[in-house]
Image (tube, rainbow, N blue to C red):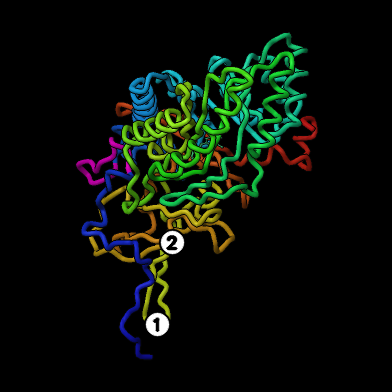
Amino acid sequence: MVHSPAVSLAPEWLVVPEDPNALAPTVWPASAHRDAGDAISIGGVSAIELVRTHGTPLLVLDEAEVRARARAFTDSFTAAASAHGTTAKVYYAGKAFLSTAVARWVTEEGLNVDVCSRGELEVALAAGVDPSRIGFHGNNKSVSEIERAVQIGIGTIIVDSAVEIERIAAAAARAGVVQRVLVRVNSGVHAETHDFLATAHEDQKFGMTFADAEIAVARIREAPGMEFIGLHCHIGSQIFGVAGFRESASRVLELHQRLLAGGAIPLLNLGGGFGIAYTSVDDPTPIEQLASEIVAAVADGCAELGMSIPQLAFEPGRAIVGPAGVTLYEVGTTKDVRLDSGASRLYVSVDGGMSDNPRAALYGAQYSARLASRAGTDAPALARVVGMHCESGDIVVDHEYLPADVEPGDLLAVPATGAYCISLSSNYNHVPRPPVVAVSNGRSRVIVRGESIDDLLARDAGISTNEGAR
Ligand SMILES: *Cc1c(COP(=O)(O)O)cnc(C)c1O
């Protein structure tokens, strides 16, 4: 059969790299580079050594990168707030990735911590996070979760529905405390990447309409044992630019002003959602610029409404931990799939996949990849990195150019996997979840142990040795 000239399967945005071994600085941790043997090194530790010690798959978190990003958020928002005569608090959104080590790093850098389940709360407490520095989110906090949160003296609870008000009031009465709460509103602004959509009402589960929020705030203000400290709004995730924040803030500030008639409101929390670079075509706005533009927009909004600017709070998750994570896999098989059109794609199978990073399967997320144990020598070939699970949607990196000589036994590194990978991981196909190691100053240490086959079997009540544990 005669093939017509090859048609490329590459998407338009993907550029053929001059050097398929190069590490794009926007996508990789600042410490990442190729060492003398051309292996990728992160936090001063070579990928080869990391895998020799900890195996694959492996999530590597660069501690200095997490700390630097946490610091950049507090410094930038504090400076921007101070320029407008107010203060700013930054909460790390623990759902992006939470372990006691990460909770300690971010709190040592001055951040507070957001949790949205009993489990996340217990990790933060086990890390020794001061309960007054924890915020509790969620659209369905159970009575027992609320009890626990109020008992331990949690800083704030973000009320998501009217039902919660009585639950919190009852828990506060039992504990004999006054619980500080925010009310989450739905501003109708939903932002993602470069665009935002603004509607009057949004058909989604989080937050309250402005009308419902007014009623809720009035009830909270009357309720004994509760103190209303401000409104909360979170408009989405992986957002570039400030237009969505500006629109949302201007809407929420109008409600804030109306509510001032019933008493002072010290705080306004504008949520998280700051975008990161997953591939070299992403161009996130520097944190300093984001902070100064968002705070200036809030200050402008307040000036227009003739009110003073409240204290501000922000809740980045992805932007703190995402770029600090690199996942290492071992290549098991490669397959050149050639279509009748003449187009071809190199399938590179690795020893993990949607169980350790479901984002491509869940959201069609894009990633990049590089050979980690060596530099490739061949020209770039269009590749798709796939996992080892029984799903054709089990994709790790949908589109990437890799050196055509990538082969079984090579180590492959996928950057920007620090956020929403391990926290969304599963045991699909009874695959154990990988360990998480922190790298810092040339050393690695396990911060979350990997699962073993014994761990997987331990929960199966049909195995006789587990009977006692039932
Ligand atoms: C998920 C979430 C965040 C963090 O979002 P990122 O995109 O990780 O910054 C912050 N606040 C709330 C309420 C969230 O649900």
The CA span between labels 1 and 2 is 24 Å
Numbered label attached to residue 341: 1
Nearer-N-terminus badge (1/2): 2
Residues marked 1 and 2 touching at CB (< 8 Å):
no
- Residue type at mark 1: give it: Ser
Is residue 246 among what the camera can see? yes
Magenta residue check for 49: no
Q: Which residue is label 2 attached to?
A: 333
Residue pictured at 38% horizontal, 44% vertical: 241
- Residue type at mark 2: give it: Thr
- Residue 455 screen position, x and y as percent: 63, 37
- Residue 62 screen position, x and y as percent: 37, 33
Question: Mark 2 CB in 8 Å range of ligand 1?
Answer: no
Q: Secondary structure at mark 1?
A: loop
Q: Residues within 10 Å of mark 2 (few under 14, many from 20)?
A: some
Q: Main secondary structure of the magenta part?
A: loop
Reply above or below: 127 against 348: above
Is residue 327 among what the camera can see? no
Q: Secondary structure at mark 2?
A: strand
Q: Which range is magenta?
A: 28-40
Figure quadrant of residue 105: top left
Identify the image quadrant of the N terminus.
bottom left
Residue pictured at 39% horizontal, 61% vertical: 399
In the picture provided, is 189 more to the left or to the right than 408? Answer: right
Q: Residues within 10 Å of mark 1 (few under 14, many from 20)?
A: few
Mark 1 or mark 2: which is in front? 1
Magenta residue check for 38: yes
In the picture provided, is 437 more to the left or to the right than 256? Answer: left
- Residue 10 screen position, x and y as percent: 36, 68
- Residue 18 screen position, x and y as percent: 21, 59
